[in-house]
Image: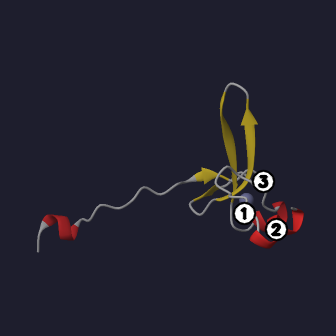
Amino acid sequence: MTAEELFPEVPPVLVVVCCDCTTLTSAPIAVRWIPRTSGPGVTLYACPSCAPKLGAAATPGDVIRTQPSWRSAAT
Ligand SMILES: [Zn+2]
């Protein structure tokens, strides 16, 4: 058994402050994204217990998809 097997590399864990209850959470859920004119936007995170009551808004990681039938019906 090698040292690498005993101590494998662990990916970094994202720990952030919940935007609602201000507690630290290691299971953040992106609930808001605030655009800024002077740089990249800011993502607000919530803990798993606060996220359902805040709801989810669109973030830059979201992809808007259209159904092929919608496009053909519009033309
Ligand atoms: Zn919270």
Q: Residues under labels 2 and 1: Cα distance? A: 14 Å
Q: Quadrant of residue 41?
A: top right
Q: In this view, does 2 lie to the left or right of 7?
A: left
Q: Residue at x 11, y 69 (%)?
A: 2
Q: Mark 2 points at which residue?
A: 72
Q: Is mark 3 within 8 Å of ligand 1?
A: yes
What residue is drawn where x is 47% and y is 57%?
13
Which quarter shows the N terminus? Answer: bottom left
Amino acid residing under circle 1: Arg
Residues under labels 1 and 3: Cα distance? 30 Å
- Of the 4 image quadrants, the one containing the C terminus is bottom right
Residues at marks 3 and 2, CA–CA distance in whole angstroms: 43 Å
In terms of sequence position, does the residue under pointer 1 or pointer 3 come before the other? 3
Q: In this view, does 59 lie above or below 48?
A: above
Q: Tell me the quarter of the picture where residue 4 sits.
A: bottom left
Instruction: Label 1, secondary structure: give it.
Output: loop
Total labels drawn: 3
Which residue position holds label 3? 20
What residue sits right under mark 1 in the picture?
Answer: 65
